[in-house]
Every structure is written in C-alpha cells, then in structure tokens.
Image (tube, grey):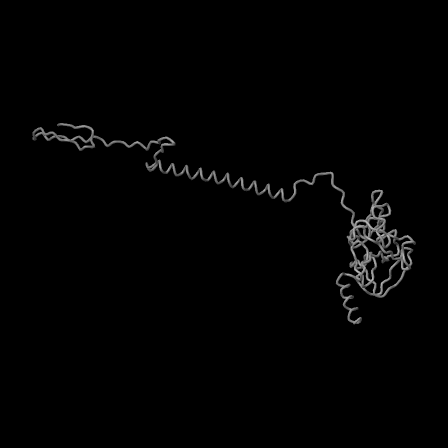
Amino acid sequence: MRRRLFPLLLSISHLLGASADDVTCYKPDRTSRTFNGTILCNSVDGAVSMCCGWNDICLQNGLCKTKIEPTNYWRNMCSISSWPEVGCLNACTDETQIDEFGNAVMTPCDGTDYSETWCCGASNECCGTDAAITVPANIYVSPSLSPSSSTSASPTSPPPSTSSGSGAEPSPEPSSESSGLSTGAKAGIGVGVAAGVIVVLGFFAFFVIQRRRKKAAIASGTFGGSAGLGAVPGVPQELGQTAVYEKPADKPNTRYELPAEQSTVADR
C-alpha cells in the first residue's frame, strides 16, 4: 500500500510545480542540509524558494502546510544560504523558536492559510499583541530576487513595514502626472463624433433631396402649396391669341361666334 501511495503523492507534488529530488536547503544559521524528497515551492527554475517536505503543501506566502491532521503550518528552510537577511520568508528565526532543522511551527491568527498575522509556535496567544507578525500573502511574485531585497515578517504594532523579497515586485509609485484619457474614453469620443457626423450628413442629404423634388414639381406645374405652409402659385399660363377672320367682299354680313375659350368677337 505504501509503495502505491508514495508515487501518487509525489506526482501530485510535481503537478503543483515543485521538484522532488535531492535538494540542499539552508537553515537560518546558514548551515545546509541535503534531503531526499524535499521540494522547492517556487516552480521557476533557479529562483529563490522555500523548502517543504514532499508530503506538505507549499503555500504562496512561503509556509508549508501539513496534509495530516491536525493541520500545522511550518516556516521551513530556504534554498539559498544568504537568508534570513536575503531571500526566503524571514519569520520565527530565533533559536528559541526553531527545531534542529531550523524549522519553526507557526499559527494563523484567523485560522486560514493566508492569515495576515501569525504567531510563532503552536498557539495563537500572541494575536492582537506586539508579538504577532505580518506575513505577505505571496512571496513568489517574480522569478528572480534582487540581492538587496528580502522578505520579512514584521510585528503588527507599531505599524508593519514589510519589505519585498523572494522576487516580490514593489507596488508602483502613483504617478503625479495625468496619464490622459483612457483607451475606452478615447474610443467613446470617436464613436460620438462619428455618429454626429453621420446625423449631420443625413439631414443635409434629406434637405437636398427635398429641394430637388420641389424644383421638379414646380417645373412640371404640379407643385401646389399646402394650407399649413402657404400656397405656392404654379407657373402662369399665357392665353392663346384672338383669332380674326376676314369676310369675303361678295358675301353678305354674317355674325360668327368665337369658340367659348376666345375672349373677343370680330365682325367683318
């Protein structure tokens, strides 16, 4: 049963991004120990990392969580010798708080894996006091670590001063200069301007079409005004000229009536 369980747990550790070979880790006093089955929690090759047992769970805050009950949290050794001044999680490194391997048990103040404050030891009696320390939620932000940086847990009172380390990138300083309009705002303005241009062109085209229709109607004599807009007269039509007929000299006087549409009558 043990032969089947070991490869399974080892595979799970690999899936979590840890390497489980012979690993050399360093205690806070910078002495080294080489373990078979120890895993490096930072999966980035060559990066600074905390060391955990192959049957532990690596947490992003640098702690190791045991899989067996009751659950315990450990601050284990580091992959580089320059700590605790540089590198891994610098917490509970006092000689009175560590075991023979340089590891220290820690207790979360809120009972969760990523508690903001922790106590060194197996109890949470320090919570709410100056002895409680602040642990960053993630010490594996970037793959490399600057030699001048470190990740340290700080007392909660006075106000904590947690410096970045294990590749943690500092938060960018807020810029005092305005960065201008955002991309979304610029896109909105562009859409608004385009819509306005389309509306104006639409009104202009409508006006031109209506004007041409009126001109065509006037030219054909079919355009008439409406009651609401005022009558627009059509093109006046010229009456035909009056027809004049000459009476022959050898015929008696006879009266002729012009057609109804003529305006005068002539007798000859």
Across and down, in percent, residue 24 comes to 87, 62
Q: Is residue 16 above or below residue 203?
A: below
Across and down, in percent, residue 116 comes to 79, 49
Q: Residue at x 30, y 31 (%)?
A: 236
Q: Which of 97 and 205 is in front in this view?
A: 97
Residue 265 occupies which quadrant of the picture?
A: top left
Residue 187 occupies which quadrant of the picture?
A: top right
Q: In this view, does 189 lie above or below 93?
A: above
Q: Is residue 140 left or right of residue 188?
A: right
Residue 150 in sight here: no
Q: Which residue is drawn at 74% across and 40% down?
A: 175
Q: Nearer the viewer, residue 112 or 209?
A: 112
Q: Is residue 240 above or below residue 120?
A: above
Q: In this view, does 218 lie to the left or right of 54?
A: left
For the image, the number of numbered tags is: 0
Across and down, in percent, residue 210 comes to 41, 38
Across and down, in percent, residue 163 comes to 83, 47
Residue 61 in sight here: yes
Q: Nearer the viewer, residue 58 or 110?
A: 110
Residue 192 occupies which quadrant of the picture?
A: top right
The quarter of the rendered structure image containing the N terminus is bottom right
The quarter of the rendered structure image containing the C terminus is top left
Q: Which residue is drawn at 22% across and 31% down?
A: 241
